[in-house]
Structure formats: C-alpha cells, structure tokens
Amino acid sequence: MHDRIFRPQDAVSFRTKHTDENGFIASIKGRTATVVTEDGDEYRVPIRELRLRKGAAPQRVRTLNDQARLDFKAGDRVAFARKGRARRLGRIVKVNPKYAHVNCGDAVWRVAYAHLAHVDVCTAGEDRRARLSEVETEADRLLHEHGLSDWRFTFDQATRRGGGCFFQTRQISVAEQFALNAPRSEVTDTLLHEIAHALVGDMHGHNKVWKAMARRIGCSAKVTHDVEFADTKWLATCPICRWQIARHRRRQGLVCRSCGCAVIFEPTVAAAPLAN
C-alpha cells in the first residue's frame, strides 16, 4: 500500500529495467501514472514504483499525443496511413482524448493524433495552445489570490461538466474542450465555482454556504452551464412526431410525451462503427 498521494505536475523518479529516470507526472489513471521524462520520453509507471523528488518544483507537461490533439478539431480534412495500407484521406467527425474518428467515406477510422496530417494549411493549434496557456495562468493566479497556493489546476477530458474540484489531491480542473470553446467569461466563472468549493470544503455541495462564498469571490453561483462543447454520441428520435434531439447517453424505456411512442436512439456519424 502506497501512502503517498501523487498529483499531476509532481517531480518524480523511477527505475526502468536499465536505468533511473527523472520526470514529471502528466496524468494519473487508477494506479498508473503517465510520466514525461526530462528527455521527453513517456512511460506508464505504477504509482507504487514512483518516488517524489524532494525540492524539485512541480511542472506541467503534456504527452506527445496530448500536444498533437490540439492541432485537430472536428471538420478538419486529414490524411493518414495505416501499417501496410495505402494513404487515406478523410474528415474528422469526432475528437476524443486519445483518438480522432476520421470518416473516409466507406468507413470511420480511429486514428492517433500523432499519425494524422492536415490536408489543408492549418495554424489553429497555435491559437488553442495560447488559449489553454491563458486559462492556466488565470487559474494559478486565482488560486493564489484566494489562499489556495497548495492547490493545483489541471485540464480534464470531461464531455458534459465544465469543471471539477478534487479535495483528496487538492486540485481543481476545467474540461479542455470547455476551455477551448466556451466564452472566456464562462471559463472564469467555472474557475471561481470550483475555487468556492475548495474554500468551503466538500461537505457543502451547492448549498447556501457554497453559494455565499461563490458570490463573495465574484462567481455567478450557477450550478450548471449551457455550453455545448463536446460531440454527442446519440440522436434521439420519435418515429411518429419526427422530432430529434442530440444526446450524450442512450436512455432505456424513454417515450415521447406527445404520442407515447418509444423513442429510438441512433448513433451519430461520430459514433458509427469503426473500421479495423
């Protein structure tokens, strides 16, 4: 059992088969951390094998795939080649943390961002990196201003919620796609929303204590946002009334209020079966 709670940005060391490595944690999933070394190499390391480098300042790092993801968005025309197969052209219909879903006409392919190339000249990645850097700077400033210097900010890959507050690891987060697509005022409000949670503690939820704190520090104290920033997987349809609504999740047993007919859920293009 490992008593140390590691966080993204921690400076760590670990032992490989042949040598000792130093690096920084890019992300943690379950009991495994993705570590980017000082030479730029990437390792997936069990948490129990990590050692904290005392005295080393934390540092934000991104994996190569995370960096490449910022160069692409839904709608981009791209080219890629699979091993042993001819070069293919297509259009991105969905982006997710690890892969782009590329519609090539005859099939939808799931392709790692590092294997994609733009067909058209595109510099949007530079703008996205600048936008995320601005949000990081603002988050760090707000945490410091409100006495939370021991807390950290990170981006996450949520598709519906705008942000999160994690008390065990003393972190607040904002969804990367939310930060890229929502108005800056909404992003700032979300940062303040999560900071208010950190200030009052996890026992208050969205009660009046949290709302009072949120308003005190300049937050609107809204509990939800109305920004659609991620691709939906399903199209809900009433076969009688002919209405359609995009949904992130498929719900069983849903019926139309008007006619009582069972609602049909069909996958969007982005959720269509993938080629091998």
Image (cartoon, rainbow, N blue to C red):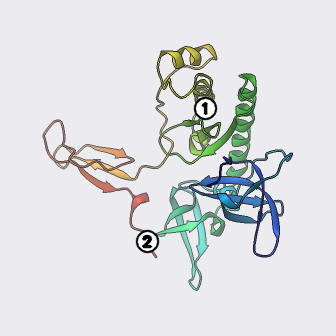
Q: How many marks?
A: 2
| Residue at the front extreme, as displayed | 1
Instruction: Give the mark nearer the N terminus: 1 vs 2.
Output: 2
Q: Is residue 121 at all visible to an observer of this figure?
A: no
Image quadrant containing the N terminus: bottom right
Q: Residue at x 83, y 48 (%)?
A: 54
Amino acid type, callout 1: Val
Query: Could you tell me which secondary element the residue under label 1 belongs to?
Result: helix
> In the current view of this chain or complex, which residue is farthest to the bottom?
84
Residue 24 x, y percent position in the rendering? 76, 54
Q: For residue 134, which numbered disc appears in the image?
A: none
Question: Is 179 above or below relative to 268?
Answer: above
Tell me where residue 6 appears, x and y as whole percent: 68, 48
SS of the residue under disc 2: loop
Q: Is residue 194 above or below residue 272?
A: above
Label placed on residue 187 = 1
Q: Quadrant of residue 112?
A: bottom right
Residue occupied by mark 2: 107
In the shown orientation, is residue 108 left or right of residue 259? right
What is the spatial separation of the Cα atoms under label 1 and label 2, in whole angstroms?
A: 36 Å
**Which of the two discs, 1 and 2, sits closer to the camera?**
1
Q: Position of residue 160 (x, y in %)?
A: 47, 41
Q: Quadrant of residue 37?
A: bottom right
Residue 41: x and y in percent read 77, 66
Q: Farthest residue to the right: give it.
A: 55
Please give left or right for residue 176 compared with residue 110 in the image.
Answer: right
